[in-house]
Image: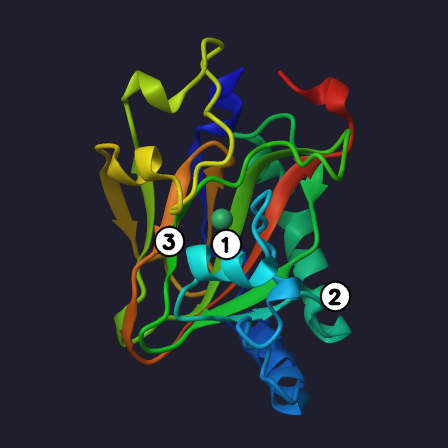
Amino acid sequence: MSQHYSSIHSVEKFLTGEETAAVIDALDVAIGAAADGFDIRQAPERSVHEITGHSPADTVEVFEPAGRTEMRHLPSEAIAVLNTASDRALPKIQAVFPFAEGIGDWIYIDYGPGQFVTPHIDYPSDPSCPGLVKYAAISVTLQHATKGGEFFVETISDPDQRDSDGRVLRDLHWADRDFRERSRTRWLVRPGLGDAILWGTEVSHGTRPVHQGCERKLIAFVQAGNAAAMG
Ligand SMILES: [Fe+2]
């Protein structure tokens, strides 16, 4: 049922101040040691986004045309902190996403001046991982840009956004003209540092361009490993 993938939620103090600082320290070491600083334009094949029929470089052009930092494999010190925080937060997450069994692998992203991500939908299922159901994305803010970089979700009531079962159409991203031109209401949010925000995997979302500073966050999916858990 589509409402399982359309909710929004938050977990305040997902990371304590001390945990947030520890994660940032571990990430900074890894970023400093990387030759390309994890700039997604340098290695588009590492992008989390995919569009059927598009090359990785074309896909990055659709989602993050000005690039972004994207680290897929976090340092073990950061993973340990996030695992502890995830276990602690799971009951709070299940209050809104009752079928969620846990949180998948975390990735780190940041947006510097001029960088942003275009509106898109993440989707509950991934053809390359049958049996996995993603209920929501979760994002933990580590640092806000000093200007711009606001995250947003979008609500769209146009029935053309959904199929006859009420499910959001597949492959909705900024290269799709119908999706791009559809009327929408955009809800901006500025979460507290260390707080987690969650949005269902059928909810359109994106990040506005950063004008100054750097917007830094961790993202993952709240999911279940059993297709039978789907409501
Ligand atoms: Fe996304």
Label 1, label 2: how far apart the Cα atoms are: 17 Å
| Marked residue nearer the N-terminal end (1 or 2) | 2
Label of residue 118 in the image:
3
Residue with the mark numbered 2: 80
Query: Which amino acid lies under the numbered mark 2 shown in the image of this protein?
Result: Ala
Query: 10 Å neighbourhood of mark 3: few (<14), some, or many (≥20)?
Result: many
Q: Residue at x 78, y 27 (%)?
A: 226
Q: Nearer the viewer, residue 132 or 97?
A: 132
Q: Which residue is mark 1?
A: 139
Q: Residue at x 70, y 41 (%)?
A: 102
174 left or right, relative to 169: left
Quadrant for residue 209, please give it. bottom left
Please name the amino acid that badge 3 sits on. Answer: Thr
Q: Give the residue type at disc 1.
A: Ser
Q: Are marks 1 and 3 in contact (CB under 8 Å)?
A: no
- Tell me: residue 73, above or below residue 167: below
Q: Is the Cβ of the residue at disc 1 closer than 8 Å to that at disc 2?
A: no
Taking depth in this image into account, of 32 and 35 the one nearest to the observer is 35
